[in-house]
Image: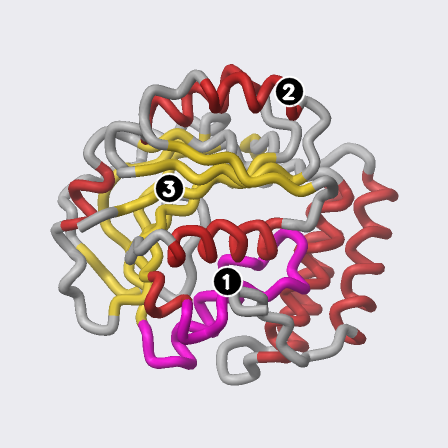
Amino acid sequence: MKVTAGIVLFNPDINRLKENVSAIESQVDEIIFFDNGSKNISEIKIMVAGINSESVLLTSSKNIGIAQALNEIARYAIKNKYKWLLTLDQDSVVYPNLIAQYKKKLNLPHLGQISCKRVDRNIKDDNITFNDCSVKEVKYCITSGTLINLEALKKINGFDGKLFIDWVDNEVCCALRKAGYKTYELNYKGLLQEMGKATFSVFLRKKIYTPNYPAIRYFYNARNSIYTARKYPTEENVCIKVLQQCKVQIHIIIFEKNKLKKFCSIARGIRAGLGLSKYHDRGLYE
């Protein structure tokens, strides 16, 4: 059973990208890169040319966003007869044997996609315990480190191109579920990633997680979470999503830097999410 990996690139750190490639290349049959208009494209081309395993570099002259880039990768994979696609961020690193563990679970009922447990580079949490390889159905999973069934992705016509970044993963989970597919999580430490510049703070004797995202990420998170809630009212509640974003604003005021810029970005995101057209902009088949 052939598996390909797809990695979306945008101004990647080449050394981190090499670490990513080194970790996955022996586990898959091919790596599909999609560059979103990176300034260091010449370095990327040199790196890809030096990969010993099968690989291809697709490019765009501008940044078309995560969802559309993933559609381009999926389209290439389907054209080349792949049935399964592992989606990865440019700075995520898979652990050994992840694909081998996934392959053991491909007979799960109505399998749309399967994800794994992840570890954040910036957070040390001694309470993390996993690796018994048990499986459970989950509502959402992140894009990076997830193995997606391309037949299922074809049924929903790919990822929603309106989602430039953030909630791309959650929206596709909703779309797959609506089409009768399930999302599973493997209790296996399979991915090392960096979520923003995440830190833990202690407030009123409680450990508080702080992602420290840039303002633009907070905008898209607010906009896209509310947009997705409006599209899938049986999955999410719009009012609750708005309240959650207000809580994020309070969290930013207490714990993060660039408070005003981030606060205003969320406010703009809420407004945009409430006004964005709900008509699908899925783009696997143009």
What amino acid is at disc 2? Ser
Q: Residue at x 45, y 55 (%)?
A: 74
- SS class of the residue under badge 1? helix
- Mark identifier at residue 147: none
**Among numbered discs 3 and 1, the one appearing first in the sequence:** 3
Assess whether residue 178 is covered by the magenta stretch: yes
- Badge 1 is on which residue? 170
Q: Residue at x 49, y 71 (%)?
A: 157
Q: Are marks 3 and 1 in contact (CB under 8 Å)?
A: no
77 vs 236, nearest the viewer: 77
What amino acid is at disc 1? Asn
> Magenta region: which residues?
154-181
With respect to residue 9, does 51 lie above or below?
A: above
- Mark identifier at residue 42: 2
Q: Are marks 3 and 2 in contact (CB under 8 Å)?
A: no
Q: Residue at x 53, y 53 (%)?
A: 72
Q: Residues within 10 Å of mark 2 (few under 14, many from 20)?
A: few
- Mark identifier at residue 5: 3
